[in-house]
Amino acid sequence: PSALEEAYTRGRWLLGLLVLQSSSSFVLDNFQDLLKENIVVTLFLTMLVGAGGNAGNQSAIKVIRGLATKKMDGSYENMANVLTQQLAVGLLLGVSLAGVGYLRVYITNGDATNAFAISLSLFFIVVCSTVLGTSLPFMLFKAGLDPANAGTTIQVIMDILGVTITCITCNFIFTQLLQASPPMGTL
């Protein structure tokens, strides 16, 4: 295709992603009180959504490459096998990254509750992104669309979901969990 045709094709997809990505502002608006009262959420939000986009993109690339090289055929059986394996990978990555995330937050912030809230969010985000990153190229393939679009799409989806997961998880921990028990400890 010519440069103009390619720009048009890619531009349509990117415009759709841009509009979709802007929806994260609604989530942030909904959790203004959480963000004002718990600045730690804001400080680590880019780390969290970045980890989600990266983990999801790794899984998407594995499937995109598998479909392109014909090592994966896009059948439901193949998709189920790959998804099961990637779920296990996501759980392992989620636990290990959450552990590192906990240490990162605790060392720089000095609060165990904050570290727990951020690291639990990180766990949920990584597991979710691995599963969605695996599923999305298969879904695009089945719909007759280019599975390569899953790479950029998973980044945007995980930006929105990452913000949502973080806000819901942290809100639960800071409001529900803390009301039921004393603080977990500070430095």
Image (spheres, rainbow, N blue to C red):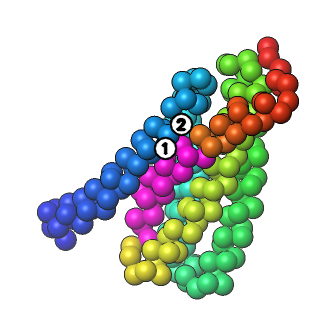
Rendered-image quadrant of the C terminus? top right
Distance CA(mark 2)–CA(mark 1): 6 Å
Task: Tell me if I can see residue 155 in this picture.
Answer: no
Q: Label 1: how many residues lie within 10 Å, few (<14), some (14-19) or many (20+)?
A: some
Q: Who's the residue at 57% across and 78% down the image?
A: 71
Q: Amino acid at mark 1?
A: Val
x and y, in percent, of residue 168 in the image: 62, 43
Q: Who's the residue at 83% across and 33% down the image?
A: 180
Q: Which residues are magenta?
A: 147-165
Tag count in the figure?
A: 2
x and y, in percent, of residue 122 in the image: 66, 42
Residue tagged 2: 31
Task: Tell me if I can see residue 90 in this picture.
Answer: yes
Magenta residues, dominant SS class:
helix
Up-down relation of residue 70 to residue 131 (above or below): below
Horizontal arrangement in the rendering, residue 135 relative to residue 92 (left or right)? left
> In the structure shown, which secondary structural element does the residue marked by tag 1 occupy?
helix
Q: Nearer the viewer, residue 2 or 175?
A: 175
Q: Look at the image and say whether residue 67 sits in the magenta stretch.
A: no
x and y, in percent, of residue 46 in the image: 52, 35
Q: Label 2: how many residues lie within 10 Å, few (<14), some (14-19) or many (20+)?
A: some
x and y, in percent, of residue 34 in the image: 58, 31
Residue tagged 1: 27
Up-down relation of residue 4 to residue 31 (above or below): below
Rendered-image quadrant of the N terminus? bottom left
Horizontal arrangement in the rendering, residue 22 relative to residue 130 (left or right)? left
C-beta proximity under 8 Å, tags 2 and 1? yes
> In the structure shown, which secondary structural element does the residue marked by tag 2 occupy?
loop
Q: Who's the residue at 85% across and 25% down the image?
A: 182
